């Protein structure tokens, strides 16, 4: 028999900003548009990962898992493949918001 529910209290959340909410933080948007690779390194640094790991599906999946954010690896891949800049900016905005809230 397959387990369909996580045992105990398991609260699923969402990203604190939408994928296309680029105007929520214009500095992150500009950082992502003009220095995309640097933004990825900043995310990797925030998460204590190698700079080469800051972009794409793997880092997004790790972050989602850590904060119980709803989604799947398939969605992470599709989002990171078709909207890489928006996905990276969304991740950085979420990190910054969690830092402000003291939950990062």
Image (spheres, grey):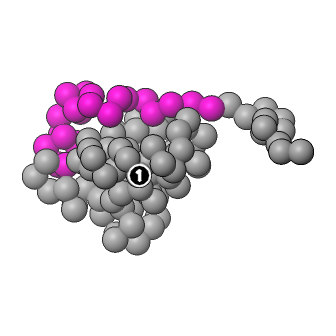
65 left or right of 57 in image? right
Which residue is rendered at x = 34% and y = 50% of the image? Answer: 80
Query: In this view, which residue lies farthest toward the left?
Result: 34
Residue 91: x percent and y percent?
A: 37, 44
The quadrant in which the N terminus is found is: top right
Quarter-of-image position of residue 10: top right
**Residue in the picture at 23% in, 47% down:** 85
- Residue 18 or residue 79, whichever sits in front: 79
Quadrant housing residue 35: bottom left
Q: Is residue 7 visible?
A: yes
Give the magenta range: 12-32
Task: Residue at 34% x, 71% y: name it.
Answer: 52
Q: Residues within 10 Å of mark 1 (few under 14, many from 20)?
A: some
- In this rendering, would 72 be left or right of 11? left
Give the side of residue 49 with respect to residue 79, left or right.
right
Which secondary structure lies at badge 1?
helix
Q: Is residue 45 above or below residue 75?
A: below
Looking at the image, residue 68 lies above or below residue 59: above
* Residue at the spot of label 1: 77
Q: Residue at x 62, y 32 (%)?
A: 12
Residue 2 location, x and y as percent? Answer: 83, 45
Tag count: 1
Q: Residue furthest right?
A: 1
In the image, residue 93 lies in the stretch drawn in magenta? no
Q: In this rendered view, identify the residue nearer to me: 99 or 69.
A: 69
**Residue 23 lies in the magenta-colored region:** yes
Percent across and percent down for residue 55 are: 33, 59
Can you see residue 89? no
């Amino acid at each position: 028999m397959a387990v369909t529910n996580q045992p105990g209290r398991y609260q699923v959340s969402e990203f604190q900003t939408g994928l296309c909410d680029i105007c929520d933080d214009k500095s992150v948007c500009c950082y992502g548009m003009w220095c995309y690779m640097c933004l990825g390194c900043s995310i990797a640094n925030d998460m204590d990962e190698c700079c080469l790991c800051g972009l794409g599906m793997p880092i997004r999946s790790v972050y989602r898992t850590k904060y119980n954010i709803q989604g799947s690896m398939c969605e992470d891949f599709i989002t990171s493949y078709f909207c890489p800049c928006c996905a990276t900016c969304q991740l950085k905005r979420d990190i910054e918001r969690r830092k402000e809230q003291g939950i990062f």
